[in-house]
């Protein structure tokens, strides 16, 4: 598996800048897990139950939730559509245990491709980043978010987990230059 990490642009329009940084962090997470075997992907950094395998699956879910479900208004994709969320609200993290690295990475890679297609379609229809997403939010939870909010949130989500991934990876094999 070859994962290329693009450098974020130094100069671009707003969409190009946000997508450039998002692509950089997407690749960073995948690179943090690269080269590890299935057992290493299940290793935790105590006292947390966070694993790199769980992170790959969680981010695949987050991609589907924000880009496909909220932004584009699609129903959840498999396996999220039948996940037992009521039994385990952190199912995406916990269910990765014992899954093969190749399967988890492929799940995230496919989710990224699908997310990019959803974003491309939404922006082709209307490039205004300030417009609300397709799926309105329950008013009790606050106002419906915008396309811009989704992009910034996903950038924040990946950047935050990239820091977690640095610590977990270093605890597994000492790697610090991923």
Image (cartoon, rainbow, N blue to C red):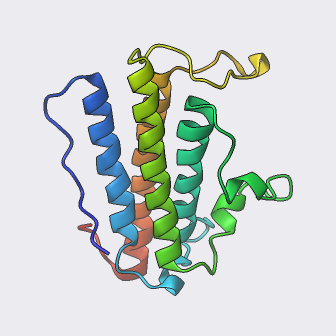
Picture coordinates of residue 72, whole percent (x, y):
56, 32
Q: From this viewpoint, which residue is outermost toward the right? A: 87
Left or right relative to 50: residue 137: right
Q: Residue at x 63, y 67 (%)?
A: 49
In which quarter of the view is residue 174 placed?
bottom left
Q: Residue at x 40, y 34 (%)?
A: 120
| Residue 89 visible here | no
Picture coordinates of residue 30, whole percent (x, y):
38, 63
Left or right relative to 94: residue 20: left
Nearer to me, 170 or 64: 64
In which quarter of the view is residue 74 placed?
top right
Task: Indicate the quadrant containing the N terminus: top left, top right, bottom left or bottom right.
Answer: bottom left
Left or right relative to 29: residue 4: left
Picture coordinates of residue 18, whole percent (x, y):
32, 32
Task: Indicate the quadrant containing the C terminus: top left, top right, bottom left or bottom right.
Answer: bottom left
Q: How many marks?
A: 0
Picture coordinates of residue 144, whole percent (x, y):
63, 18
Note whether 20 is above or below 152 in the view shown. Answer: below
Q: Residue at x 23, y 67 (%)?
A: 177
Nearer to me, 169 or 130: 130
Note whether 176 is above or below 121 in the view shown. Answer: below
| Residue 32 visible here | yes
């Amino acid at each position: 598996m070859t994962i290329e990490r693009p450098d974020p642009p130094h100069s671009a329009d707003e969409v190009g800048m946000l997508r450039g940084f998002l692509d950089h962090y997407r690749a960073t997470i995948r690179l943090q897990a690269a080269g590890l075997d299935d057992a290493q992907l299940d290793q935790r950094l105590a006292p947390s139950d966070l694993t790199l395998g769980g992170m790959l699956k969680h981010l695949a879910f987050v991609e589907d939730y924000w880009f496909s479900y909220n932004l584009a208004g699609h129903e959840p994709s498999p396996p999220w559509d039948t996940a037992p969320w009521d039994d385990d609200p952190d199912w995406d993290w916990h269910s990765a245990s014992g899954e093969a690295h190749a399967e988890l990475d492929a799940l995230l890679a496919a989710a990224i491709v699908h997310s990019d297609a959803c974003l491309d379609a939404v922006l082709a229809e209307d490039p205004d980043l300030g417009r609300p997403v397709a799926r309105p939010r329950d008013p009790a939870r606050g106002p419906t978010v915008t396309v811009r909010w989704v992009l910034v949130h996903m950038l924040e989500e990946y950047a935050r987990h990239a820091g977690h991934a640095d610590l977990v990876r270093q605890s597994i094999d000492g790697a610090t230059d991923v």
